[in-house]
Image (cartoon, grey):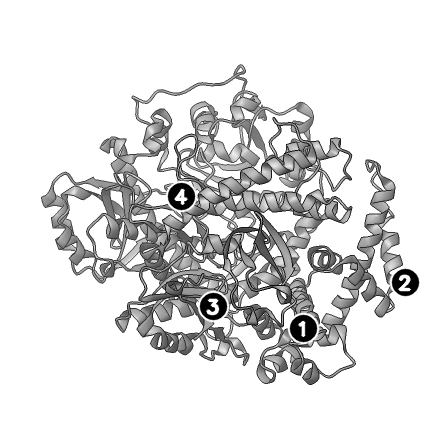
């Protein structure tokens, strides 16, 4: 079906002589199924695979074929998958007859797909067992399995899955797939293009569409739209290629108006038509987005159009001719305008055809899903997609088009000052640690080797056997008394900020780095949001990641004018820094003097670059108040949590702190004095307990992830003494010392570390016990969810979306226990995070719609998990808040009686205020 262009020559890079690709069953005349492995195997491995398959194949006959007819070397495997398998792989049509069943093992899958469009893990579908797909090139059904080293002679989930897959392939009733030939229409004149548009001006069914562009960035100087391709629901096997320069743009606007548009990652195409295609944004709306539909149906599988083509259509691999051309002419990968129309138009037409077929299939699958996995309160997977996800994608399309205003002049100054500070700090460290000049201090491996040679204690080793130099290792060395660590940590913070948030306009290669690389031609940052595409349906963000802008720092850069008024510092014991004689010096705020010069935290310098379009706007960030805690209360129906949110203002941190640290006093008294010491400090610790244990973290993990970072060793020892936990601490110490690693050199040091940790562990264990005694309903919900996931292999949100947890269905003795623990955590945090994402996106999209309908000039510019970020016109602040309150505070049946609230705040950049640093309620 997909013939390569004859003028494109093959590339050869093999390093070994071809061998017979049939590794087993060469003399069989009747074959029930075929097994495809990556390359020729050692006889001992091959014999074990044959034995395993034979034991589970119920007397079925099979042949084993090698995807590569030679044993590849390391440099072969570094080549692209397409080069290795498409150019040099076994021609399967010579060894596998049409209408066969094929079991692939590991990378053997690549000789079928010639790319990594499909994930092996994506076939671990223990819900619907859709574990195979059709491969048109060999006209056969493919049943993927993981690589043999994960299951051969092991008791693992992968071994269990392979047995299941063999059972399925044995019982599969293979039928001849009747494939309809796709019709690809190339228009060459304006008359042809515009006639098609006129004929469909009033078309009211779904239309799939796609664009091919010269560049990937709509704001690129030389970017342009090459073509528009269309496919209509009435004729889903015909795609039309319309060269964009031939289209009447006024007619195109009329054509798009009020259409049911179906696409894959529709944001991309809408941005291009809006920025470069002369199409008004109001005429482009998303009826269905296949990328989100694919993700909703199976978050373990990839969600590109190419992967969907394999899974949901008979046209998997339709892009092979294009991929081969790009392999031969690499410049085409960056510029599709260099690709001949004879190659581009069949591919582009298939994009539109495949999009339509995937859409029609997804609609069926979503309906089947909702029948199989119903939820209460009127929600479902389909409703979540149509009422939340697709409207949210519309909102984020506009967010990306609007972009975020940025002060590049401030970035220039920051870049220069930070470069100087880094140079100064680097020289200081080289002298302090007596490092050789040719050593790269920014290399973790080099630093680890150097510190080991200096005789520093072992904080743990990487897979390479080198000392770790991560944050935990630094804290470990700091506790060992290495004062140099403070300087290393400060340097690392400066260096990380430079690399991630600052950068330079041009490096030694002439390229921008840091935030400079995100500067568009309009001087706006147009980041990309993968709307609701995290496994939990939260958003992701990239180029840059606007959900991960630094909010705290321990280092400083620059200074304010001398202080003239110190009234606001009098009652505080907080430490700050003053700038004196070129140094940043710690002082207590209450000890500041008139004339002292306050140092500026680095985070302030980074965040002050984010600004507003003009002084008529304010920067607003609005957070869900205790959102995840409220969601946990909704799911668990815990009486104590319910009482807190219904009757006590939602202050769960005070209840946790009171029950943990001072149960002898009343909760009312604690809340009344929560801003005074010691209650203020206890409440801060209670907050860490709430967010550390809400998802059932073990006491040992809680001790390491929270207490060791936030408590001093003396605080842990005092807690053990106060609550008489000495016996428990000794028991934990005995357990820690039970298995001593023979590679440990300094046993005395290691033993002391374990002793110290035992105090944290004993404290954490007692706190965890108190926590779940306080919130018994939460513990019951945890237990019920774990039991459900072990039985059925998934966790479901009250809104309808499902998160697969296949590794919990079967847990073998050889399974990775850390992986199982991770999935047990997912069972609890996924429905909560999904609820959070759905709540924020649902209300953002509804608010966005009303703001547009009422003519507001205010608009959204981002989201950070439990918050939403708009630019607000000053004269619209109250009316916008009214809209937000209307939707975000609306009681919904799905909330199970728990009130949900948002804390509204803004930053006035015109007054020199900084987003995320200075905030006012409104």
Q: Quadrant of the C terminus?
A: bottom left
- Nearest the viewer among 127 and 423 is 423
Q: Quadrant of the N terminus?
A: top left
The answer to whether residue 685 shows anywhere in this view is yes
The kind of secondary structure element at disc 3 is: loop
- In the rendered image, the residue lying farthest to the left is 191
Which is in the foreground here, disc 2 or disc 3? 3
Q: Is residue 66 left or right of residue 622?
A: right
- How far apart are labels 1 and 4 at the CA level? 42 Å
Q: Earlier in the sequence, mark 1 or mark 4?
A: 4
Q: Which residue is mark 4?
A: 516
The kind of secondary structure element at disc 4 is: helix
The answer to whether residue 133 shows anywhere in this view is no
Contact? badges 1 and 4 (CB < 8 Å) = no
How far across and how far down the image is residue 849, in percent? 32, 69
Q: Earlier in the sequence, mark 4 or mark 2?
A: 4
Q: Earlier in the sequence, mark 4 or mark 3?
A: 4
- In the rendered image, the residue lying farthest to the top is 17
Q: Earlier in the sequence, mark 3 or mark 1?
A: 1
Q: Which residue is mark 2?
A: 727
The kind of secondary structure element at disc 1 is: helix
Please report the residue visible at 59 percent of the width from the left and 64 percent of the height from the top: 593
- How far apart are labels 2 and 3 at the CA level? 48 Å
Q: Is residue 705 left or right of residue 79?
A: right
Marking on residue 680: 1
- How far apart are labels 3 and 1 at the CA level? 22 Å
Q: Is residue 10 left or right of residue 628?
A: left
User: Which quadrant of the structure image shows residue 392?
Assistant: bottom left
Q: Which residue is mark 3?
A: 919
**Disc 1 residue crowd, few under 14, some 14–19, many 20+, Cα 10 Å:** some
């Amino acid at each position: 079906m997909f013939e390569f262009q004859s003028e494109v020559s093959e590339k050869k890079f093999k390093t070994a002589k071809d061998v017979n690709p049939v590794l087993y069953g060469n003399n069989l005349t009747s074959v029930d199924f075929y097994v495809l492995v990556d390359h020729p195997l050692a006889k001992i491995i091959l014999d074990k695979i044959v034995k395993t398959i034979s034991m589970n194949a119920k007397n079925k006959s099979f042949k084993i074929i090698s995807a590569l007819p030679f044993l590849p070397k390391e440099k072969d495997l570094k080549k692209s998958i397409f080069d290795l398998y498409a150019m040099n792989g076994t021609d399967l049509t010579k060894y596998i007859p049409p209408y066969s069943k094929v079991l692939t093992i590991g990378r053997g899958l690549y000789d079928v797909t010639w790319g990594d469009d499909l994930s092996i893990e994506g076939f671990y579908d223990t819900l619907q067992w859709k574990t195979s797909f059709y491969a048109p090139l060999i006209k056969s059904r493919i049943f993927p399995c993981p690589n043999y080293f994960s299951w051969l002679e092991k008791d693992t989930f992968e071994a269990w899955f392979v047995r299941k897959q063999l059972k399925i392939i044995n019982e599969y009733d293979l039928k001849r797939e009747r494939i309809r030939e796709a019709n690809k229409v190339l228009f060459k004149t304006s008359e042809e293009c515009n006639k098609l548009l006129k004929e469909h001006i009033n078309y009211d069914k779904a239309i799939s569409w796609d664009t091919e562009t010269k560049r990937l960035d709509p704001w690129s100087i030389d970017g342009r739209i090459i073509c528009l391709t269309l496919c209509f629901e009435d004729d889903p096997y015909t795609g039309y290629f319309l060269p964009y320069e031939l289209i009447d743009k006024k007619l195109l606007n009329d054509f798009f108006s009020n259409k049911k548009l179906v696409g894959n990652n529709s944001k991309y195409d809408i941005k291009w038509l809006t920025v470069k295609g002369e199409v008004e944004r109001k005429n482009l709306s998303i009826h269905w987005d296949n990328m989100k539909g694919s993700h909703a149906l199976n978050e373990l599988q990839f969600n590109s159009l190419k992967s969907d083509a394999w899974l949901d259509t008979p046209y998997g691999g339709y892009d092979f001719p294009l991929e081969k051309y790009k392999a031969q002419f690499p410049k085409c990968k960056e510029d599709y305008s260099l690709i001949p129309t004879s190659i581009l138009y069949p591919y582009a037409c298939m994009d539109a055809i495949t999009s339509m077929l995937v859409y029609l299939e997804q609609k069926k699958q979503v309906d089947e899903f909702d029948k199989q996995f119903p939820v209460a309160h009127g929600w479902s997977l389909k409703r979540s997609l149509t009422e939340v996800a697709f409207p949210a994608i519309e909102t984020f399309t506009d967010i990306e088009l609007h972009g975020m205003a940025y002060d590049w002049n401030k970035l220039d100054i920051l870049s220069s000052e930070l470069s100087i500070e880094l140079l100064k700090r680097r020289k200081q460290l080289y002298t302090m640690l007596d490092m050789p000049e040719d050593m790269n201090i920014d290399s973790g491996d080099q630093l680890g080797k150097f510190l080991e040679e200096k005789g520093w204690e072992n904080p743990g080793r990487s897979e390479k056997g080198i000392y770790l130099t991560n944050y935990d290792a630094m804290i470990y060395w700091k506790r060992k008394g290495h004062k140099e660590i403070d300087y290393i940590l400060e340097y690392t913070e400066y260096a990380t900020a430079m690399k991630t948030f600052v950068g330079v306009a041009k490096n030694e290669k002439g390229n921008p780095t840091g935030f400079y690389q995100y500067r568009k031609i309009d001087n706006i940052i147009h980041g990309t949001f993968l709307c609701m595409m995290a496994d939990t349906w939260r958003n992701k963000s990239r180029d840059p990641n606007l959900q991960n802008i630094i909010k705290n720092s321990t280092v400083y850069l620059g200074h304010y004018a001398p202080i003239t008024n110190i009234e606001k510092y009098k009652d505080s014991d907080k430490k700050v820094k003053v700038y004196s004689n070129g140094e940043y010096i710690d002082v207590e705020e209450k000890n500041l003097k008139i004339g002292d010069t306050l140092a500026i935290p680095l985070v302030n310098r980074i965040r002050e670059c984010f600004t507003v379009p003009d002084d008529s706007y304010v920067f607003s960030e609005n957070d869900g108040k205790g959102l995840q805690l409220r969601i946990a209360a909704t799911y668990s129906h815990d009486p104590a949590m319910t009482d807190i949110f219904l009757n006590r203002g939602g202050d769960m941190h005070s209840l946790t702190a009171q029950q943990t640290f001072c149960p002898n006093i009343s909760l009312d008294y604690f809340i009344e004095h929560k801003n005074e010491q010691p209650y203020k400090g206890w409440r801060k610790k209670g907050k860490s307990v709430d967010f550390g244990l809400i998802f059932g973290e073990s006491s040992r993990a809680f001790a390491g992830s929270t207490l060791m970072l936030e408590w001093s060793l003396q605080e842990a020892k005092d807690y053990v003494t106060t609550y008489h936990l000495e016996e428990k601490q000794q028991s934990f110490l005995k357990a820690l010392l039970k298995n001593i690693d023979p590679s440990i050199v300094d046993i005395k040091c290691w033993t002391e570390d374990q002793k110290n940790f035992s105090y944290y562990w004993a404290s954490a264990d007692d706190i965890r016990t108190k926590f779940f005694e306080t919130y018994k309903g939460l513990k019951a919900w945890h237990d019920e969810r774990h039991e459900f996931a072990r039985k059925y292999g998934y966790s479901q949100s009250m809104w309808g979306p499902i998160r697969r947890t296949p590794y919990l269905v079967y847990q073998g003795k050889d399974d990775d226990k850390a992986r199982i623990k991770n999935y047990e955590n997912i069972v609890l945090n996924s429905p909560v995070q999904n609820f959070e994402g759905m709540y924020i996106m649902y209300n953002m999209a509804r608010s966005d719609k009303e703001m547009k309908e009422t003519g507001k000039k205010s608009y959204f510019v981002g989201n950070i998990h439990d918050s939403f970020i708009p630019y607000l016109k000053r004269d619209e602040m109250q009316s916008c808040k009214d809209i937000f309150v209307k939707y975000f505070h609306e009681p919904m049946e799905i909330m199970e009686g728990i009130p949900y609230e948002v804390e509204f705040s803004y930053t006035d950049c015109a007054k020199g205020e900084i987003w995320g640093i200075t905030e006012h309620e409104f």
